[in-house]
Image (tube, coloured by chain):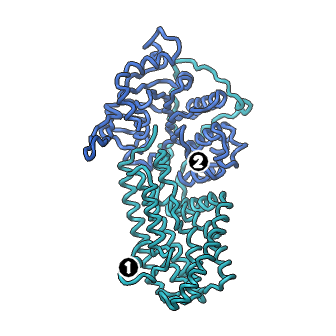
Amino acid sequence: MSAELRYPAKATSRGRPRNQVAHGPRSRHDGTLVRNPPCAVAPARAPGEAVFQLYARIAWYGFRRYSAYRAAALAGAFTNTVFGILRAYVLIALWQARPGLAGYDVADAVTFCFLTQAFIGPMQLFGGGLGMAERIRSGDAAIDLLRPASLQGWLLADDLGRALYLFLLRSIPPTIVGALLFGLVFPSSAATWAAFAVSMLLGIVVSFGLRYLVDLSACWILDDRGTAQVSLVLSLFFSGMVVPLNIMPGWLGTATNALPWAAMVQVPADVFLGKITVTDALTFQAGWAAVTLALGAVITRAARRKVVIQGG
Amino acid sequence: MIDVQEVGRTFTIRRRTGLLRRERRVVHAVQNLSFTVRAGEFVGYLGPNGAGKSTTIKMLTGILAPSSGRIQVAGLDPARRRTALARRIGVVFGQRTTLWWDLPLRDSFELIRHLYKVDRVAFRRRLDELTELLTLGEFLRTPVRQLSLGQRMRGDITAALLHDPRVLVLDEPTIGLDVVSKAAMRGFLRKLNAERGTTVLLTTHDMGDIEKLCDRVMLIDNGRLAFEGGIDDLRATAPEETSIEDVVARLYARGAPAAGQRQARGQ
């Protein structure tokens, strides 16, 4: 190993004396390059651990990257709270006129409303790409493709870091305000809280899976704005963000509850409210997470093969 | 260290010519290209815009697979062993950055350490050395978005060298730099090559880079190798010209008839 990594001796004979260049501000530093013993020695740790460390660090940096935009996050939290209050009054009026609709009472409906507001940030319900489409368009994707890491894994880790940050800044404040103003229904058992945490995480992964597909579509159509628009409308409606999916009648209700977007709002909210069997909910979400990630992996491979990197 | 044998790369461009009719056109970005770069060499890779330089670099780094021919870089086939190769080579695209925009420079390096699995002690030593040589000290804690172009470029060079690659591929590393930064960058690269024996392949439009750094020059035009040799050989192609710019301009002009085709290829 070490023999292989050693530097070959530099060919000494140079045909031509070189012009000397002033070193500018550097010249006061009398730095020399020391010929080190070969570094890049593989760490003694198990490779799995090293990989985990890498992705954990990416996630942590994703968190920190977003924390550079604290004012934006706080403004988002404020907006989410105000809209939560407006929507809560609409839903109260609706549920007072139609008690028991969708199996919710008024308190459930108001809680649902504030949960959906809380999900907006972490699940990026109003769209919000991974930045990859822009990088494909500009050609910076070349750099991402050079890195010895999985593009999808990388972006997922980064996105989880982002989601955690937005969860803290954009999910908790509206929920607190909602609880103070309206008195929300909170799970009573620790098990439900744990199930909700897992459910929310899976929801974020499904959201990532879908947004990743939208971003990569830029490889084929050069611009993801169209797909992002379509995706925005689909995710707002089919996730349960606008109205609970349980309200939808007959086959429409069945269909919307089976689509991946339900894993982002309706299902985690129902886990929170205790309106769904936990194992069913988590299996459903994990299934869609697996499908979207697998599809993303296949498309990444196709993209690598066809990739036409923009710009010189 | 780099071995390219009869490599070609074609792109198929589809263009609408009517309401439903589409025209398919095959563009040869690179054809029948062969060259070798020995270990420890500093080679300049020249060519007019759209000549196939970037395509070659993308093939050398494994981002793009050649349509025909064979490539070996640091003992590996780039397209097949992209990840393994990434650990043996360093790449700098002067017009792009590997650094994380919102993070302090230091954090980008730390991520790269994990990415390339560089062991902590070696990383520290290497970073200290590069910090000294490239005088990064004063902005290691500054977010990349606040760096000047010269600082960012030094950061990018450092990022490409942290895992101690045997081959460094530079795509216009001095673009946009002022004369002082440019001189500093050249001084550093020469030192890296001379003292550490790092093989360097450099593409540039700056003839100063070529004159001051390269042992040998390869010139590509219309996807083919149009010239190969030392700086003196390059001058000898047009002895009546005094500046190296004019010599190279003459060589470029020779392949000029296909200028229209070239533009399409830049995509």
B48 shown above or below A239: above
Q: Residue furthest right?
A: A28
Query: Which residue lies at the image location 53% right of the left edge and 66% below the top edge?
Result: A124
Chain identifier of the cyan chain: A
Picture coordinates of residue A75, whole percent (x, y): 66, 64
Amino acid type for the residue under numbered disc 2? Leu
Query: Which residue lies at the image location 55% right of the left edge and 83% below the top edge?
Result: A272
Query: Which residue lies at the image location 38% right of the left edge and 81% below the top edge?
Result: A254
A200 shown above or below B72: below
Disc 1 vs disc 2: which is toward the camera?
1
Where, by quadrant of the figure, is residue A17 drawn?
top right
Residue carrying label 2: B99
The secondary element bearing badge 1 is classed as helix
Q: Which chain letter matches label 1? A: A
Amino acid type for the residue under numbered disc 1? Leu
Hue used for the chain lettered B: blue
Residue carrying label 1: A252
Picture coordinates of residue B153, whole percent (x, y): 60, 39
Q: Which chain letter matches label 2? A: B
Task: Evaluate whether label 1 is on the same chain as label 2.
Answer: no
Query: Which residue lies at the image location 35% right of the left edge and 33% below the top edge?
Result: B30
Q: CA distance from mark 1 to mark 2?
A: 47 Å
Pick whichever, A67 or A181, lies toward us.
Answer: A181
Q: How many marks?
A: 2
